[in-house]
Amino acid sequence: MRVRERRQLAIRCSVRGRRFEFDELLEVAYRRLDSVSDGRAGEVVAAEEHVDWLIWLESACFEPDVDDTGVTTRCQDCRSTASHGGGEEPFVTSRCEDGAMGIVSSEIEIDATREDVWALVSDVTRTGEWSPECVRCRWLGGASAAVAGARYRGASRNGWRRWSTTSTIRVARLDAELVWDVTYLGRPVARWGYRLSELDGGGTLLVESVEDRRERWLQIVSPWITGARDRAARNAETIDTTLCRIKALAEASAVNDSMSGRDEGGADLDG
């Protein structure tokens, strides 16, 4: 066992069972990142690296081990999260809009209002409920809602690989569009977005897209960071999984709201 591996093992052993103390360390690291977010580039990168290290340590010490099996396929995922009638897979269309720019997008029809779907996708703290890579997001700099300029930190993983990024919301049009830029160590990674439109027969068409904005050096090293050699194919796969999960959550919420409304109506009649 190499010296570095022995040190990591020693740290993991000393941290295990001390969740409360570790949470305090992570909170201090996030506060430090907030305080230097507008400072010198070197300070920002150092703070981000500190948070990255703690996120890796958290996953190693407090989360169950995950096999390096990659992304769950969208049909398996949809059947495991909700019923879509007769076991059929919801219709998802994936396409590469511009191969040169690395733009990938997918769309799905959801039997729920735009307001309900927007309430889901605009709450970045719930991203871990539908993303197969991003497991957790946390607002930065006192932000608490999706508005232009708001920033948040995302923790991601693929099998045993862990990494974190910083996102800045660029566009937030209520019930219509959400766009955010992602950076890694202060350098551009991608521009992601959701577009919502109302369907003629009711319901919502949700489109998710991503534009690869990595610099050449990051394109070279990112496969070792994220485990994905073909980023465009990986994005198409994760987007389809994400859309299926959002559909399941939004439609389940719509059904619950409908049942709750009927129950309240029945109570009024009884009264």
Image (cartoon, helix red, strand yellow):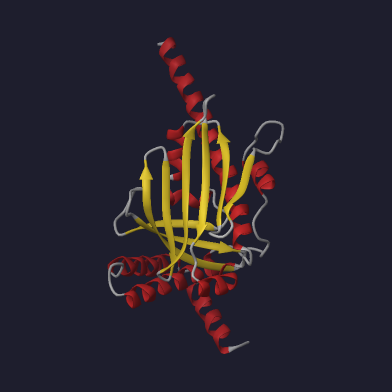
Of residues 262 and 122, the one drawn nearer to the viewer in this rendering: 122
Q: Answer yes or no: is residue 248 visible.
A: no
Q: Position of residue 86 (x, y in %)?
A: 71, 31
Q: Residue at 70% across / 36% down in the picture?
A: 88
The correct choice, above or below, for 236 with respect to 162 in the image is above
Of residues 61 and 86, the one drawn nearer to the viewer in this rendering: 86
Where does the N terminus fall, quadrant-wise?
bottom right
Of residues 158 and 200, the one drawn nearer to the viewer in this rendering: 200
Tally the marks: 0
Horizontal arrangement in the rendering, residue 91 relative to residue 52 (left or right) = right
Q: Residue at 43% across / 39% down in the picture?
A: 118
Q: Position of residue 140 (x, y in %)?
A: 34, 59
Query: As drawn, which residue projects farthest toward the bottom?
Result: 3
Q: Answer yes or no: is residue 132 visible.
A: yes
The quadrant where residue 52 appears? bottom left
Q: Position of residue 143 (x, y in %)?
A: 31, 54
Q: Residue at 29% across / 56% down in the picture?
A: 142
